[in-house]
Image: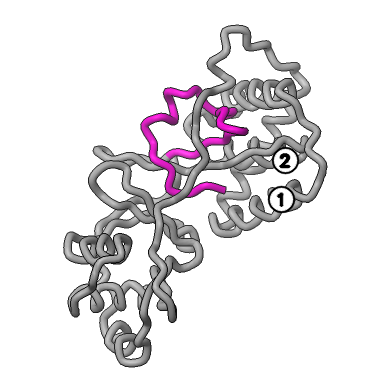
Amino acid sequence: MIRSACRATDGDARGGDAAARHRQCLPAMGYRLAPDISFCDPGGQRIFLDVRNDRYFAFGAASDLSMTRLIAGESLDDQDVSHLTAMAAADILIATADAPRPACCAAPATMSSILDRDDLPSPPLLATLHAAMRLRRAKAMLRHTSLAQMVRRFRLAKARLATAERSATIDTALRLATAFQAAARLVDALDQCLPLSFALAHRALQHRLPVDMLIGVKLRPFEAHAWVQSEGTVLSDRLDAVQPYTPILAL
């Protein structure tokens, strides 16, 4: 599970006096999402992830309706402008001179899982121990490092791979997936998807295997989950473990 909890809030309530000052000095034509803010609709309620502050949140009905109108490009009334201005004052939106529309998280498709194969090999002991070491390191880093820093670190590593020659094969993906699956059992991390995902994703990049790390959410009850996939094939979970979740952040 991801560390943060989700709570409902109304943008106009959060802005306060800062929102009033914002209305006076920012006659903007549009808004875009602030850095480190993303959102999705997992089924009837829009959920936001604030990476910088390591939290999930949802708006109350009135503010959420204003956000819906902004996304749809509809005309905004004074109440909508008040709500959106408060969101900007709370560093959720950024006022712009043009009229962009915030968009849901754009995530790559998830089509299969390498761990659903019937012929999964047993990973070599050395590979499992190496994965366990990396998993313990990721757990320790998450205790002392912010989620935003971890996200930036992964993005930088992935950007470096984009300029390098990609040489990994499906055999590499299979070895990594089985090694980290065994390591998660070894260090009691089967229910700790975030350190597992960061550890596996970084190791995959070191092997020049292109991967995406996704964080998804679901409602009733609210839950969040992270996983790693390569070209639509999940490496860190079985497919049925990730299918209930709607991606809210794709790295």
Q: Quadrant of residue 151?
A: bottom right
Name the outermost residue toward the top.
Answer: 119
| Residue type highlighted by circle 1 | Ala
Observer-nearest residue: 128 or 83?
83
Q: Are marks 1 and 2 in contact (CB under 8 Å)?
A: yes
126 relative to 218, above or below:
above
Report the residue at 49% width, 35% height from top: 109
Observer-nearest residue: 60 or 25?
25
Residue 66 within the magenta-colored segment of the rendering: no
Instruction: Give percent across and percent down for residue 129.
Output: 72, 26
- The tag on residue 88 is none
158 relative to 221, above or below:
below
Report the residue at 40% width, 52% height from top: 104
The residue under label 1 is 157
Q: Residues within 10 Å of mark 1 (few under 14, many from 20)?
A: some
Magenta highlight range: 225-251
